[in-house]
Image (cartoon, rainbow, N blue to C red):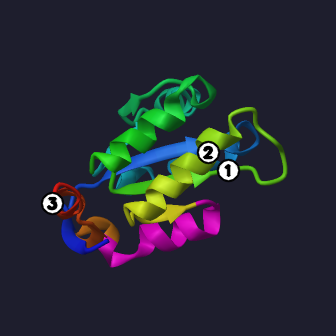
C-alpha cells in the first residue's frame, strides 16, 4: 500500500493504557512527567484514566475499561487519526482475558505508524525526544488511494 504524510501537531493526542499489574508503574511515570503531559490531550481506558485523573489532576478523556471495549475504542481512534502517540504499559507475564483486543490495538498502532511505548524505558525515550513537543510528520497508509484502486 502506498504511503502518505500525516502531520502530528505540537499538541499531541496521547493514549494511556495499562494492564492491572502495570497501573501503578504508569501512574508513577505520569506523575513524573505531569508538567510535560499537561501540554497535550490525554485519552485513556477507563480504570487507568480514572486513576490518572484522581492522582494527578490531569484532564483525561476516559474510554471504557479495556476488557469492556476500551482497547477497541482507542484502536478505532488510532485508525481515525485521532491518536498520535500511545503509552501502553502492558504485562507480558500475565494473561488477560481480552488478549485479542490488546493484540489488535498494538497491530493498529503499527499499521498507522504511531509512536508506541510498551514500557517505562521506551516511554522515557519518547517523552524526552524533541519530536514529542513539536510538529512532526509520519508516514501512514494511503487509505483513500487504496479505495480508489479497489473501485477500478
Indicate whether 66 appears above or below 81: above
Quick one: label 1 or label 3, which is nearer the N terminus?
1
How far, Cα to Cα, is label 1 from label 3? 42 Å
Residue 56 visible in the snapshot: no
Tell me the tag on residue 125: none
Q: Where's residue 89, x and y in %? A: 63, 52
From the viewer's perspective, is the residue at label 1 or at label 3 nearer?
3
**Label 1 – label 2 distance at C-alpha:** 9 Å
Q: Nearer the viewer, residue 15 or 77?
A: 77
Task: Say whether residue 61 is left or right of residue 118.
Answer: left
Q: Secondary structure at mark 2?
A: helix
Position of residue 59 relative to residue 121, above or below, is above
64 drawn magenta: no
Which residues are drawn in magenta? 118-131
Q: Earlier in the sequence, mark 2 or mark 3?
A: 2
Estimate the x, y position of residue 151 in percent, counting from the top left: 17, 54
The residue labelled by disc 3 is: 152
Pointer 2 residue: 102
- Judged from the image, the secondary structure of the residue bearing numbered disc 3 is loop
Q: Quick one: 47 or 36, which is closer to the camera?
A: 47
Q: Residue at x 36, y 49 (%)?
A: 78
Residue under pointer 1: 90
CB within 8 Å, label 2 to label 3: no
Q: Residue at x 34, y 67 (%)?
A: 132
Amino acid at each position: 500500500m502506498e504511503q502518505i504524510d500525516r502531520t502530528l501537531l505540537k499538541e499531541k493526542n496521547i493514549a494511556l493504557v495499562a494492564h492491572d499489574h502495570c497501573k501503578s508503574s504508569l501512574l508513577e511515570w505520569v506523575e513524573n512527567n505531569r508538567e510535560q503531559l499537561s501540554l497535550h490531550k490525554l485519552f485513556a481506558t477507563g480504570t487507568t484514566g480514572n486513576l490518572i485523573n484522581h492522582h494527578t489532576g490531569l484532564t483525561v478523556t476516559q474510554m471504557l475499561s479495556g476488557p469492556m471495549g476500551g482497547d477497541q475504542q482507542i484502536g478505532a481512534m488510532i485508525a481515525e487519526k485521532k491518536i498520535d502517540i500511545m503509552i501502553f504499559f502492558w504485562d507480558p507475564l500475565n494473561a488477560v482475558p481480552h488478549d485479542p483486543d490488546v493484540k489488535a490495538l498494538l497491530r493498529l498502532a503499527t499499521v498507522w505508524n504511531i509512536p508506541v511505548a510498551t514500557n517505562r524505558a521506551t516511554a522515557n525515550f519518547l517523552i524526552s525526544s524533541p519530536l514529542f513537543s513539536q510538529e512532526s510528520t509520519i508516514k501512514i497508509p494511503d487509505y483513500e488511494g487504496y479505495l480508489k484502486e479497489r473501485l477500478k
